[in-house]
Image (tube, rainbow, N blue to C red):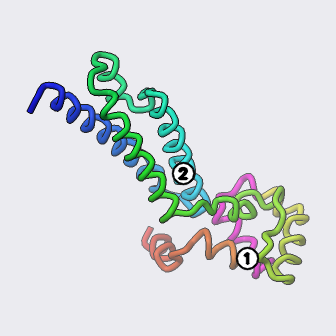
């Protein structure tokens, strides 16, 4: 293996370590208490946007987003013209795969995250839309919203506005039996 090839393999390893580090950060963001589908969708959307930005930066030869690679690029510019297109292709492929398998649905959850400042979704039935309107003008609920967690708030809504509460909880607690088991064993 030549010295230049060895340098390119080293840069590839550094690039991959940076990307895996970014994926590990996402993994940690997706875990924990009070993590709900709308929050998870936002975290994934943020990574997709970052991937797009990093790809544009790589087009300009800018490796700043990748700490390990950036440090090496400062000390050695040989081989950059051959490995950066490889990095760019890798970032582009990652972006496409995330977009394919995890579509951006975060906007559809706005009514759950901020019900008092969002219109009812277009796919609501008339009865759901009526309950949503009644709920959003309920002063007591408006006061409770900022001081409760999302699932606590929507569990309370379900008692007074069952259609809206049930619909929100199917999104917030997609694995309700697991959630119930967690609450019971805690």
Can you give x and y, in whole percent of width and height, for residue 105 in the image?
Answer: 63, 63
Where 153 falls versus 86 (above or below)?
A: below
Residue drawn 73% across the image and 76% down it? 158
Most distant residue in the top direction: 75
In the picture, the disc for residue 158 is: 1
Occupied quadrant, residue 36: bottom right
Residue under pointer 2:
43
Can you give x and y, in whole percent of width and height, for residue 35 in the image?
Answer: 54, 58
Residue drawn 36% across the image and 42% down it? 19
Q: Which one is in front, 114 or 80? A: 80
Q: Residue 2 magenta-drawn?
A: no
Horizontally, residue 168 falls left or right of residue 183, namely right
Occupied quadrant, residue 132: bottom right
Residue drawn 43% across the image and 72% down it? 185
Horizontally, residue 166 falls left or right of residue 178, namely right
Span shown in magenta: 145-164
In the picture, the disc for residue 149 is: none
Which element type, helix, strand or loop, lies under badge 1?
helix
Q: Residues within 10 Å of mark 2 (few under 14, many from 20)?
A: some
Q: Which one is in front, 95 or 143? A: 95
Horizontally, residue 17 falls left or right of residue 34, namely left
* Image quarter of the C terminus: bottom left
* Image quarter of the N terminus: top left
Give the alpha-carbon distance from disc 1 to disc 2, as whole Å: 27 Å
Where 181 falls versus 66 (above or below)?
A: below
Q: Residues within 10 Å of mark 1 (few under 14, many from 20)?
A: some
Which element type, helix, strand or loop, lies under badge 2?
helix
Can you give x and y, in whole percent of width and height, for residue 16 in the image?
Answer: 30, 42
Q: Is residue 34 in view?
A: no
Tag 1 near tag 2, CB within 8 Å = no
């Amino acid at each position: 293996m030549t010295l230049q090839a060895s340098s390119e393999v080293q840069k590839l390893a550094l690039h991959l370590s940076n990307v895996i580090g970014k994926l590990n950060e996402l993994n940690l963001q997706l875990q924990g208490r009070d993590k709900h589908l709308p929050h998870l969708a936002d975290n994934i959307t943020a990574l997709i946007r970052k991937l797009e930005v990093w790809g544009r930066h790589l087009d300009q030869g800018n490796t700043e987003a990748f700490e390990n690679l950036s440090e090496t690029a400062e000390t050695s510019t040989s081989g950059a013209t051959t490995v950066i297109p490889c990095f760019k292709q890798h970032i582009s492929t990652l972006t496409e795969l995330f977009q394919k398998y995890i579509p951006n649905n975060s906007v559809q959850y706005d009514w759950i995250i901020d019900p008092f400042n969002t219109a009812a979704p277009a796919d609501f039935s008339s009865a759901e839309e009526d309950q949503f309107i009644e709920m959003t003008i309920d002063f007591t609920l408006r006061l409770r919203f900022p001081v409760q967690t999302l699932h606590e708030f929507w569990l309370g809504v379900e008692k007074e506005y069952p259609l809206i509460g049930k619909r929100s909880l199917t999104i917030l607690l997609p694995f309700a039996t697991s959630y119930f088991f967690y609450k019971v064993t805690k």
